[in-house]
Image (cartoon, rainbow, N blue to C red):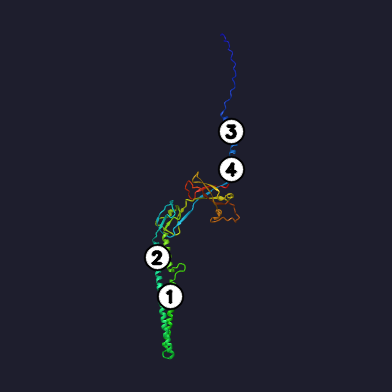
């Protein structure tokens, strides 16, 4: 038998100190979610409250509207006489000065009217000369007629004396009486002709000129005015708009708008505020203007005027609320805002704007 080897005693295991367990990924995510929940629960309401308080503090004492538009004075230019356009001197969008040529109308028919009016003046002055000569002739005729009356009177007196003595015939007596009556009638006719000639030769009490001559001169002045109106010039400085309506050879109708001049040097803003915003608004209050077309641009201004009526009052068909289906609608009042400084960008009529008026 084999000898059994002695058995080695086994060493007793000594327990090692207990190590801390490593945090699991799930535990870290739960911790972050807890903090996020606390931030959302407490921080978000506080931020909303702080934002509301800040907005209230900043907006207190001011009213705003985005129902606002840039406005400019616009002048519609129309020809005062009709005719064919022979020249167009401007283009759309061009800046023009006051008195600058815009377009011309054919002036030949109006030049002929001036010549005709001049001839009418000459004819009237010739007629005045004829009337003066006729007046002088009438005076001569009156003198001759009076001499005939004297001669006829002497002849009649002689025939009357002879008739009383029976030395003449009844026919001779009647002939002498008839000749005297005719001589006296010619005197009356000559005197009437002289009165008529003096009346036609008389000058007007206001002008001191013969009425026919004055009428001819007025006619020529009107013809000269019409001739000058064939050249159409800018009534004011500004930018030309709608000039594409004008074409050489086109017939222009008197009074029909041909183009528009926009006064870009003096813009303003028409802001339509709600009637509930007008309680503290006054003329002269400070305003700020912002433009949709130019983000970041802010222009200082002030309240120039507050409208005398709401927009509906000046509409073509004003609202009638005398019915059973009446619904109250907040009205808008136009407020004109003037610029206190020149904008850094060019203004265009009709641009949308946002206006804030500081009422405190």
Q: Name the residue under label 1.
A: 194
The answer to whether residue 182 is above or below residue 47 is below
Q: Which mark is residue 35?
A: 3
- Which of the 4 quarters of the picture holds residue 100? bottom left
The answer to whether residue 269 is above or below residue 154 is above
Mark 4 or mark 2: name the one nearer the start of the chain: 4
Q: How many labels does the image show?
A: 4
- Which of the 4 quarters of the picture holds residue 145? bottom left
Q: Nearer the viewer, residue 56 or 210?
A: 210
Mark 3–mark 2 Cα distance, whole angstroms, equals: 103 Å
Q: Mark 2 points at which residue?
A: 118
Q: Name the residue under label 4.
A: 57
Q: Nearer the viewer, residue 98 or 46?
A: 98
* CB under 8 Å between discs 4 and 1: no
Mark 2–mark 1 Cα distance, whole angstroms, equals: 29 Å
- Residue at 41% of width from left, 62% of height from top? 224
| Residue 104 seen in the current view | yes
- Residue at 42% of width from left, 85% of height from top? 154
């Amino acid at each position: 038998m084999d000898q059994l080897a002695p058995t080695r005693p086994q060493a007793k295991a000594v327990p090692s100190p207990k190590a801390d367990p490593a945090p699991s990924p799930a535990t870290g995510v739960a911790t972050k979610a807890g903090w996020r929940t606390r931030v959302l629960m407490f921080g978000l309401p506080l931020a909303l409250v702080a934002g509301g308080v800040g907005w209230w503090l900043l907006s207190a004492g001011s009213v705003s509207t985005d129902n606002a538009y840039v406005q400019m004075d616009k002048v519609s230019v129309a020809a005062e006489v009709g005719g064919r356009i022979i020249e167009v001197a401007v283009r759309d969008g061009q800046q023009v000065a006051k008195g600058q040529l815009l377009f011309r109308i054919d002036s030949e028919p109006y030049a002929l009217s001036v010549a005709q009016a001049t001839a009418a003046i000459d004819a009237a002055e010739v007629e005045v000369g004829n009337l003066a000569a006729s007046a002088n002739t009438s005076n001569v005729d009156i003198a001759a007629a009076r001499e005939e009356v004297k001669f006829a009177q002497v002849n009649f007196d002689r025939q009357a004396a002879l008739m009383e003595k029976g030395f003449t015939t009844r026919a001779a007596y009647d002939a002498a009486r008839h000749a005297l009556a005719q001589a006296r009638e010619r005197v009356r006719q000559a005197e009437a002709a002289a009165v008529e000639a003096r009346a036609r030769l008389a000058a007007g009490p206001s002008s001191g000129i013969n009425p026919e001559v004055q009428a001819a001169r007025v006619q020529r002045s009107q013809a000269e005015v019409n001739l000058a109106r064939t050249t159409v010039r800018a009534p004011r400085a500004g930018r030309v708009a709608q000039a594409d309506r004008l074409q050489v050879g086109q017939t222009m109708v008197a009074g029909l708008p041909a183009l528009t001049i926009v006064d870009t040097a003096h813009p303003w803003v028409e802001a339509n505020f709600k009637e509930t915003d007008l309680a503290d608004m006054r003329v002269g209050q400070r305003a700020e203007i912002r433009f949709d077309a130019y983000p970041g641009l802010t222009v200082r201004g002030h309240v120039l005027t507050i409208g005398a009526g709401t927009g509906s009052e000046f509409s073509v068909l004003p609202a009638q609320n005398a019915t059973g289906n009446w619904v109250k609608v907040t009205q808008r009042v136009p407020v004109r805002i003037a610029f206190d400084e020149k904008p850094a960008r060019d203004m265009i009529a009709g641009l949308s704007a946002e206006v804030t008026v500081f009422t405190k």
